[in-house]
Amino acid sequence: MNNSSKKDRGLLVILSGFSGAGKGTVIRELMKRYDNYALSVSATTRKPRPGEQEGVSYFFKEEDEFLQMIQRGELLEYAKYVDHYYGTPAAYVDRNLDEGRDVILEIEIQGALKVKEKRPDAMMIFVTPPSAEELKKRLTGRGTETEEVIDARMRRAAEEAEGMEKYDYILVNDDLDTCVEQLHQLIRMQHMAASHQKAFIGEIQKELLALSYI
Ligand code: ADP
Ligand code: 5GP
């Protein structure tokens, strides 16, 4: 018997990390290489940046629409981050988990901790570059922010680093290829956790009972 024949629910994977750590890059590459992942698209009240598309980057909402989503219980979590609301629509997450896909949430720490409270078996992964110097280099190299904004993001990173110990895993994004493979392997390993093998465990328990009464 092979436990891969019985499909369990997918895993909920939370990815957080400093702005500029490479989260977006790593997720894009992971999804290109493997097809069992679904990336959750958040709702936000912030305005789209040039090039961002409705329903792809975010679902862009007015504040009253966002508050209605909260009231209707449509969000798995939400948080206010630098003057704007961000939240995870629950329906997409649950549909994909039910279909056996591993769902990735790229969210900040307040939201991550709320998800962990509601779904204790969610994996919490924190992505970091190998050093602060490298973070500054990447933020500068991306060329999307002014020097002032880069300094603000570096200060914010120092605050965010305070929460790193709350995560289950720290993933160092030094060489991109290595990082993507480590992330994939980490998630594969987590599938072996007994808490994610309920279908298999139930099945083998039934089979053992049946055979032991022959
Ligand atoms: P985040 O989504 O965490 O804010 P991005 O994915 O936008 O970060 O990456 C920030 C910058 O760092 C981008 O210019 C990206 O090309 C670069 N980058 C990402 N991963 C690596 C890596 N492993 N090595 C070097 N540069 C990287
Ligand atoms: P940005 O405005 O740069 O796209 O995102 C700002 C921050 O909000 C990032 O740290 C990002 O991970 C986080 N974020 C994006 N979507 C969500 C969400 O649905 N919930 C929470 N809690 N944070 C989010």
Image (cartoon, rainbow, N blue to C red):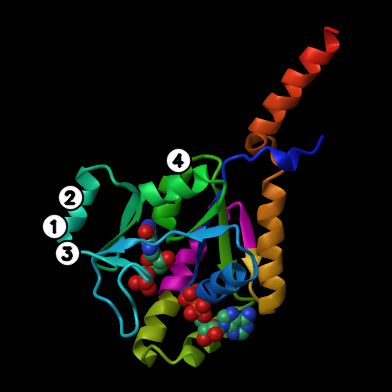
* 156 sits to left or right of 68: right
Distance from the alpha carbon under mark 2 to that under mark 1 = 6 Å
Q: Magenta segment range?
A: 156-170
Residue 80 forms part of the magenta stretch: no
Image quarter in which the C terminus is found: top right
Q: Secondary structure at mark 3?
A: loop
Residue denoted by label 2: 68
Give the SS element for disc 1.
Answer: helix
Crowd class of label 3 (few under 14; some 14 to 19; many from 20; radius 10 Å):
few
Of labels 3 and 2, earlier in sequence is 3
- Estimate the spatial distance between the alpha carbons at disc 3 and disc 1, rounded to whole Å: 6 Å
Left or right, 171 with reference to 80: right
Residue 162 on the magenta span: yes
For the residues bearing labels 2 and 1, Cβ distance under 8 angstroms: yes
Cα separation between marks 4 and 1: 26 Å
State whether the magenta stretch is mostly helix, strand or loop: helix
Per the image, the residue denoted by label 3 is: 62
